Amino acid sequence: MGDIKKIIKNPLLLFGSLGHRGFFNWMSDEQYLKILYKTRMGKPLNLDNPQTFNEKLQWLKLYDHNPEYTTMVDKYAAKKWVADRIGGEYIIPTLGVWEHFDDIDFDKLPDQFVLKCNHDSGGLVICRNKSKLDINSARKKINKCLKHNYYWGNREWPYKNVQPCIIAEKYMEDTASKNLSESERCLTDYKFFCFNGIPKIVYISKDHASEPRTDFFDMEYAHLPLRMRDPNSETPPAKPNNFGEMKELAEVLSKGIPFLRVDFYSVDGKIYAGELTFYHCSGFAPIFPKEWEVKLGEWIELPNSAWGGTR
């Protein structure tokens, strides 16, 4: 009921929802993003002289079109891209790849695994006990994601031409989390915000927890007075022993890119690469306090083209 009241007061809130369903595919990316930004952020999008972090991410969507980015956002193709740069030991093992859900032979999969789509965000099925897996529910979720072109919702152009597929990965879990409830048994994400190959801050979260908490630290691991979508933890997470190694790997993977969020997991002290993200929260995450939105924006040097110069 609360959502309905919000829409009645501001019908533009329907815009994003309808956009994800393809109702505005006829709009240019610039037209669409200007309306969506106004809807979500409550202010006009300044593309002529972008200053804030979120404004610059929208600018990069429109004007920084390096073809390599499509490989980097493809969760299957990115495995080789990352391995070629930092080594295969940092890659979560792949158990299988399929174009169609009904091609999956579940008898050949281990008791625990993760299914995901390679081309979107959200197409994820975590199986901790194969005997309890609801295959019909998994099929419905994965097939819905396979039909969806993730690009259209927020115009993140690298996703536009990713060929959808399903991948199964090894189930990863820290030994220390085995005694936790199922809702809390999720990996900790270490998300490094990198600017032209220089990690500046790390965002630590448990995105799939029942009550997500996030904390930001600088590269000396000082806790920052910064918040985005979720509240900070009551007790900030301790610095992992392999923090320095993760930082060095993030530098390698983000070299030459105006902004890249490089995600890692640390499982029993071993580092595994997660996603490579060009547009954190698609450039629609309110940042508190407000001065940090400008500070993060100052760290992004916009290229004159995809291959040289800054503005």
Image (cartoon, rainbow, N blue to C red):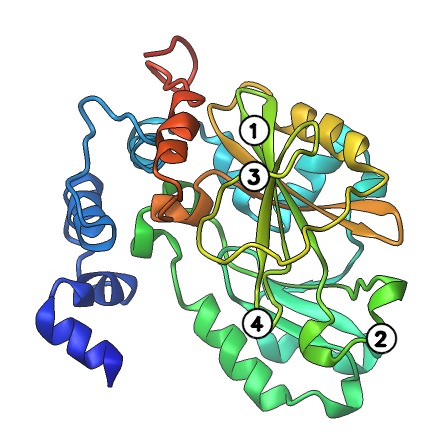
Q: Are marks 2 and 4 in contact (CB under 8 Å)?
A: no
In this rendering, does residue 125 appear at all? Answer: yes
| Residue beneath disc 1 | 194
**Secondary structure type for disc 3:** helix
**Tag shown at residue 72:** 3
Of marks 1 and 3, which one's residue comes earlier in the chain?
3
Instruction: Name the quarter where the C terminus is drawn.
Output: top left
Q: Which residue is mark 2?
A: 110
Among the two numbered marks 2 and 3 on one chain, the one whose residue lies closer to the N terminus: 3
Q: x, y (%) of residue 253?
A: 65, 29
- Determine the secondary structure under disc 2: loop
| Foreground label between 1 and 3 | 1
Q: Is residue 203 above or below residue 145?
A: above
Foreground pick, 248 / 106: 248
How far is mark 1 from mark 3, CA to CA? 15 Å
Q: Amino acid at mark 1?
A: Cys
How would you rate the neighbour count of disc 3 (Cα within 10 Å): few for under 14, some for 14-19, many for 20 or more?
many
At horizontal 19% and vertical 80% (from top left) the residue drawn is 4
Identify the image quadrant of the N terminus.
Answer: bottom left
Q: At which x and y percent is residue 231? A: 51, 58
Q: Amino acid at mark 3?
A: Met
Residue at 66% from the left image edge and 24% from the top image edge: 251
**Mark 2 belongs to which amino acid?**
Pro
The foreground one among 284 and 72 is 284
The Cα atoms of the two marked residues, 1 and 4, are separated by 35 Å
